[in-house]
Image (tube, rainbow, N blue to C red):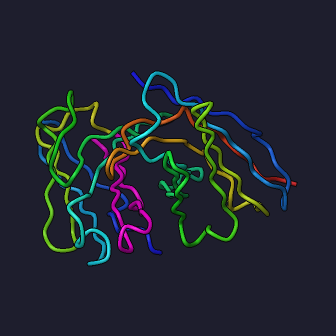
Amino acid sequence: QSALTQPASVSGTPGQSITISCTGTSSDVGGYNLVSWYQQHPGKAPKLIIYEVNRRPSGISNRFSGSKSGNTASLTISGLQAEDEADYHCFSNSGGSAFRVFGGGTKLTVL
Amino acid sequence: QVQLQQWGAGLLKPSETLSLTCAVYGGSFSGYQWNWIRQPPGKGLEWIGEINYSGSTKYNPSLKSRVTISVDTSKNQFSLHLTSVTAADTAVYYCARLLGASVTNWGQGTLVTVSS
């Protein structure tokens, strides 16, 4: 079982938009509309920000959006703010829902 | 508001068994999947496995031979046992609640260090 592939790091300036990709296979990302995304600040537990590819939990800013094309899911953060600086992780069902898999994580730096 | 509180030994020697327990407060125990997830220092998250109310389990294939997840519905608790630990098992371990396919709630995390 391989982790989903995310860029190790991305960066942007306040007000910009950035996109983080999460690439898998037809056995995970491509096979289900069940990709979720988590934001994690240092020393804290992750927090759900996107579920089922593009749905936002209550209380999550509409600056966060998700999408999927084929075997790649994407998280877009618009109007970048300093508080968005964090690690971001994608997550998906895999193997016919026999197990689940995370991406390797992406560190977002707000310059 | 559901809360997950976890506990267990934080320092182990190689070849010992890691044991963690997670208690669920303030919410239903049925209808969800109860998960264990870990994060080695400075690295990404790794899914370990899960159990549901009826005791049905799923495990990460790479850990399956060493992992057992069990549930005690009378106490609203679930547990993780990982045998034959090595330094590679050093990580922060989280218990978590899954709804559908998304982690909605996390425990506070427990740092488990494996060192001789």
Q: Residue at x 26, y 50 (%)?
A: A11
Residue A4: image location, x then y, percent: 37, 68
- Is residue B87 or residue A1 the one in the foreground? A1
Image quadrant in which the N terminus of chain B is located: top left
The chief SS type of the magenta part is strand
Relative placement, left or right, of B76 versus A47 is right
Q: Is residue A78 magenta?
A: no
Residue A6: image location, x then y, percent: 33, 64
Q: Residue at x 62, y 30 (%)?
A: B75
Q: Extreme bottom residue here?
A: A26
Residue B107: image location, x then y, percent: 52, 34
Q: Where is residue B72, by image quadrant?
A: top right
Relative placement, left or right, of A33 versus A103 is left
| Number of marks in the rendered image | 0
Relative placement, left or right, of A15 versus A100 is left
- Is residue B23 or residue A56 the one in the foreground? B23
Q: Where is residue A46, by image quadrant?
A: top left
- Is residue A56 or residue A41 the one in the foreground? A56
- Is residue B33 or residue A80 the one in the foreground? B33
Q: Is residue A105 magenta?
A: yes
Q: Is residue A46 above or below residue A30?
A: above
Q: Residue at x 69, y 62 (%)?
A: B88
Image quadrant in which the C terminus of chain B is located: bottom right
Residue B31: image location, x then y, percent: 39, 42
Q: Is residue B29 above or below residue A52?
A: above
Relative placement, left or right, of B84 versus B20 is right
Q: Residue at x 68, y 58 (%)?
A: B89
Which residues are drawn in magenta?
A86-110
